[in-house]
Image (cartoon, grey):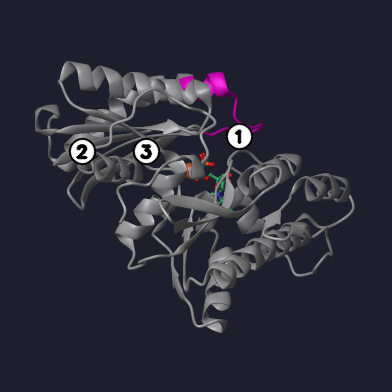
Amino acid sequence: MVTLGIESTAHTFGIAIIDGKEILSNVTDSYTTEEGGMIPVKVALHHEEVYRKVLDVSLEKAGKTMEDITLIVYSNAPGLGHALRIGHAAAKSLSMKYDLPLVGVNHCIAHLEIANLVTDAADPVLLYASGANTQIIAYDEGKYRVFGETLDIGIGNFVDTFARNLGLGFPGGPKVEQLALNGSEFIELPYTVKGMDISFSGLETHTKRLIPQVQKEDLAFSVQEHVFAMLVEVAERAMAHIGKNELVLGGGVACNKRLQEMCKIMCSERNAKFFCPENQYLVDNAAMIAWTGQLMYEHGITREGINPYERTDEVAVTWRS
Ligand code: ATP
Ligand code: FE2
């Protein structure tokens, strides 16, 4: 089965081609700004503009033509309505033109399934840390359950807002990571863990006020130490509570080397295994969409339409026994 997957839930538009378990191409083009954040209409325009080029490059890299494709998959939830609609339209038109089945995939679940494919994790807890989402997820009785999550904004959106307040562009995560490397003084900041859940809005207000008063390198360093410790704490609590001894990372924020290091230390201290897919499978990508849709299709599932608000634990995971 040769599957073409389309990702378009947020700032990244991507198309990947996979053949069974082999990823033949995984091409993305992301909306960025030098100043300010994401404007949904502009994101959609970006996706529309790059669609044809991303499709051509992906097919070429895979050494395939549209005639070789046997299944079309796209991310249909959750995400920005404006952006989802572009991916859906592209997928639908390809499926009609080439008379191919169509499967809509939940993007958050795809972050987990790709980790199962590209790492040796068997039944892990996923620390999913992206722009819009921050969740601790694990499989239990027919669903990917959310054991802990942010009570307000996603960690990436928090880091991006912090970066914007510092006058840096979007996405801010990599810029804050660089700044933090030159920070040395630890500034105490709000640390909000509530059971298995976490919250960033208090920290957002607090850091905004501190920006003019302290060295920005020290603040970036301290922000990272706090928010990553919060993530590691809830991930560890979930692992202990549900008795799983594997941790995998997912989401763009998981590209951060300091977060990876802290997760690795936590896992080694509790004799658990730590897995981190390479960056191209952490950030939003279409390979994870293609792979998840293919799994679903092989188990008789097709889905259509878009659902900007679908939660991870609303999807019946009937493709996993
Ligand atoms: P989702 O729809 O799953 O919420 P997303 O649209 O936010 O995903 P991702 O590519 O998973 O997309 O994550 C993007 C986020 O990752 C941005 O907020 C960005 O700042 C952050 N990020 C990327 N690299 C790093 C890094 N090195 N350190 C911290 N954050 C990072
Ligand atoms: Fe994502």
* First along the sequence among labels 2 and 1: 2
- The residue that appears at 83% across and 58% down in the rendered structure is 190
Position in image of residue 168 (x %, y %): 67, 42
Reply above or below: 305 against 236: above
- Mark 3 Cα-neighbour bin, 10 Å: few <14, some 14–19, many ≥20: many
Q: What secondary structure do most residues of the magenta stretch adopt?
A: loop
- The residue that appears at 58% across and 42% down in the rendered structure is 171
Position in image of residue 43 (x %, y %): 51, 25
Question: Callout 2: helix, strand or loop?
Answer: strand
Quote the CA–CA distance across marks 2 and 1: 35 Å
View extreme (left): residue: 67
**Picture disc at residue 28:** 3
Q: State which quarter of the image contains the N terminus.
A: top left
The label nearer to you, 3 versus 1, is 3
- The residue that appears at 29% across and 40% down in the rendered structure is 293
Reply above or below: 318 against 60: below
Amino acid type at circle 3 is Thr
What residue is shown with label 1?
A: 34
Question: Callout 3: helix, strand or loop?
Answer: strand
Amino acid type at circle 2 is Thr
* First along the sequence among labels 2 and 3: 2
Position in image of residue 320 (x %, y %): 31, 53
Magenta span of residues? 32-44
Whether label 2 lies within 8 Å of ligand 2 gets the answer no
What residue is shown with label 2?
A: 3
Q: State which quarter of the image contains the C terminus.
A: bottom left
Position in image of residue 70 (x %, y %): 14, 33
Question: Callout 1: helix, strand or loop?
Answer: loop
Name the side, left or right, on which 24 lies relative to 315: left
